[in-house]
């Protein structure tokens, strides 16, 4: 049992921001996205990406639509330096994409980072230093003034070096690392000093990036911190306000969304939430969250599974089956009541109408999935799931009463096996229950003659091995067959369907007959390329299921004619 940890963990101090505005806002437009997959993401891998993998991931990020991509930490790694050079020298950076590199606020490392970027059309030099009390007091043993001086010196150096290379359009980005665990007035002071030192203007803005380096509080606290900065930064017009949430508390997505409502214009993160520890904020989830609110995210995730497969292969990180939007199971319902609601919702959904399907916040088709996996059947499922699979895989809609019977049989099978029941198995169970001749009565064939007085049918059945012919006349083949069969059965229900089982479509006839004596009803089906044949097969099977058919096994009444050989 964990003791209440008052003595060990302290609650995070709230921000004094009584007139906060973010709670009343909604997201209306996407932020500028920056992918840090090749930097923060890469730093967090067991095996960092090699150059080929980096190139492939860079191309994927460009194809998704990222316009700002942080491509490495060239002052810290030769491989990163070589990769930056490779992209620039081989001209692999699209015209509309800006690359960025991260550098600590140290002179020699800044020099090396800018050296890596020489020749780029446009580049972001991303300088950071940690500013929170624990870094100042314990890690670096520096005063606030010294920490601020580091940032300002670094900024001046970037300015001086980049001024000497006007062929590149340079952008300074500054991150007060551990911002979310730092006194707000100190963060503001240091950011203001950086903006001044760089001589930022509203045309040449500095990116001030606020990291939740470790997520230490609830998302509303982060939103307050961002709104506070948004309102207090001295030269807001000369700043692009950016956030960089990590997911230590599992709320990075919420933190990023609230931060944008609070004034952030740019969000840094990784695909599928890769990144240090619990990850950077997941840009896929953020983008698709926007999409489901009717806001075009500016990133293309219409082939999400392909993107996920590539990202997983390159990072060697598996995708959790319940990962938002992309997990294998996120569009799947096993429970009966969910399936029933989804099935009804999908049936009611009209093309072009607003998406309104219970339990599915996103149309799976929008991210390249189909509806086949939406409903999967196991012992927790109900007839809704069975109905959906039959319709999705075979194009068959069963009458409700037949579905109830089939649902019970499928459930019994699932209880027996304890596993999932696939569509093909449901179809087999259906065939076993409704498409099989009984032991005693077998359908053999028929002759049909259409005359002026109606349809004459001669049914050939084998009853307990003896061939029997029944003849009748009616206003249609089915009516004639009903009249031919002994017992004066009543046809209470008839439906026909086209079935997509195998390559050819076949006719499926569904009938329900009643014994007029005791009201007992039986349902059965017939499947044949000829609709009349399918209907008569179904009728014979239903009739055979009635108790009266057992009693008339040796029937030789007015309708019956024994076959020439008397045998099947
Ligand atoms: O998480 C963090 O603080 C960072 C900074 C270097 C931006 O990755
Ligand atoms: Zn980070």
Image (cartoon, rainbow, N blue to C red):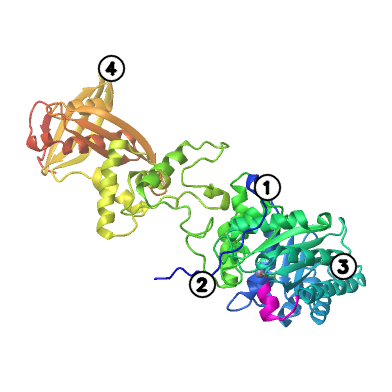
The disc at residue 452 is: 4
Residue 445 position, x and y percent, is 23, 38
Q: Is residue 113 left or right of residue 383?
A: right
Which residue is rendered at x = 45% and y = 50% of the image?
374
Q: Earlier in the sequence, mark 2 or mark 1?
A: 2
Q: CA distance from mark 1 to mark 3?
A: 30 Å
Residue 151 placement: quadrant: bottom right
The residue labelled by disc 3 is 197
Q: Earlier in the sequence, mark 2 or mark 4?
A: 2
Q: CA distance from mark 4 to mark 3?
A: 103 Å
**Picture layout, residue 45 above or below residue 565:** below
Q: Is residue 201 left or right of residue 348?
A: right
Which span of residues is magenta-colored?
A: 133-143
The residue labelled by disc 2 is 7
**Picture layout, residue 122 above or below residue 73:** above
Residue 225 placement: quadrant: bottom right
Q: Closer to the camera, 202 or 147? A: 147
Which residue is rendered at x = 26% and y = 46% of the image?
408
- Depth check, mark 4 against mark 3: the one in front is 3
Q: Main secondary structure of the magenta part?
A: helix
Q: Residues within 10 Å of mark 2 (few under 14, many from 20)?
A: few
The residue labelled by disc 1 is 21
Q: CA distance from mark 2 to mark 4?
A: 99 Å
Q: Secondary structure at mark 2?
A: loop
Q: Closer to the camera, 299 or 177? A: 177
């Amino acid at each position: 049992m964990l003791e209440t940890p008052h003595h060990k963990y302290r609650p995070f101090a709230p921000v004094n921001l009584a007139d906060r505005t973010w709670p009343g806002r909604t997201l209306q437009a996407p932020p500028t996205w920056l992918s840090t997959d090749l930097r923060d993401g890469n730093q967090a891998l067991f095996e960092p990406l090699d150059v080929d993998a980096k190139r492939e991931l860079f191309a994927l990020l460009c194809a998704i639509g990222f316009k700002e991509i942080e491509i490495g930490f060239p002052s810290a790694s030769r491989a990163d330096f070589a990769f930056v050079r490779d992209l620039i020298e081989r001209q692999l950076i699209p015209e509309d994409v800006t690359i960025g590199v991260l550098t600590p606020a140290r002179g020699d490392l800044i020099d090396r980072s800018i050296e890596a970027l020489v020749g780029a059309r446009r580049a972001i030099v991303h300088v950071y230093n940690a500013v929170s009390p624990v870094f100042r007091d314990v890690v670096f043993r520096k005063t606030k003034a010294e920490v601020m001086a580091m940032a300002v010196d670094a900024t001046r150096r970037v300015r001086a070096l980049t001024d000497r290379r006007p062929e590149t359009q340079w952008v300074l980005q500054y991150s007060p690392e551990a911002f979310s665990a730092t006194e707000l007035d100190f963060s503001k002071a240091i950011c203001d000093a950086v903006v001044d030192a760089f001589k930022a203007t509203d045309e040449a803005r500095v990116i001030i990036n606020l990291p939740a380096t470790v997520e230490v509080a609830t998302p509303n606290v982060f939103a307050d911190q961002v709104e506070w900065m948004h309102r207090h930064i001295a030269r807001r017009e000369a700043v692009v306000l950016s956030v960089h949430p990590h997911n230590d508390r599992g709320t990075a997505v919420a933190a990023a969304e609230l931060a944008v409502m609070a004034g952030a214009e740019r969000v840094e993160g990784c695909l599928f939430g890769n990144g240090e520890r619990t990850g950077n904020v997941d840009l896929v989830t953020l983008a698709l969250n926007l999409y489901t609110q009717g806001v075009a995210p500016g990133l293309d995730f219409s082939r999400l599974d392909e993107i996920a497969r590539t990202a997983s292969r390159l990072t060697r990180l598996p995708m959790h089956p319940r990962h938002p939007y992309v997990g294998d199971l996120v569009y799947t319902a096993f429970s009966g009541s969910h399936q029933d609601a989804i099935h009804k919702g999908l049936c009611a959904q009209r093309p072009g109408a607003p998406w309104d399907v219970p339990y599915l916040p996103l149309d799976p088709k929008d991210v390249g999935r189909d509806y086949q996996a939406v409903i999967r059947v196991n012992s927790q499922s109900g007839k809704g799931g069975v109905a959906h699979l039959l319709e999705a895989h075979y194009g068959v809609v069963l009458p409700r009463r037949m579905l109830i019977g089939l649902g019970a049989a499928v459930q019994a099978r699932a209880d027996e096996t304890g596993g999932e029941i696939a569509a093909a198995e449901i179809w087999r169970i259906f065939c076993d229950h409704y498409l099989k001749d009984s032991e005693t009565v077998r359908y053999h064939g028929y002759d049909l003659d259409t005359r002026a007085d109606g349809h004459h049918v001669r049914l050939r059945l084998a009853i307990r091995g003896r061939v029997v012919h029944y003849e009748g006349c009616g206003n249609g083949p089915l009516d004639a067959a009903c009249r031919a069969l002994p017992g004066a059965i009543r046809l209470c229900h008839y439906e026909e369907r086209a079935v997509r089982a195998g390559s050819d479509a076949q006719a499926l006839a569904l009938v329900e007959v009643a014994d007029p004596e005791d009201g007992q009803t039986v349902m059965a089906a017939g499947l044949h390329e000829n609709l009349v044949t399918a209907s008569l097969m179904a009728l014979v099977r239903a009739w055979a299921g009635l108790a009266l058919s057992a009693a008339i096994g040796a029937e030789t009444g007015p309708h019956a004619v024994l076959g020439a050989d008397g045998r099947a």
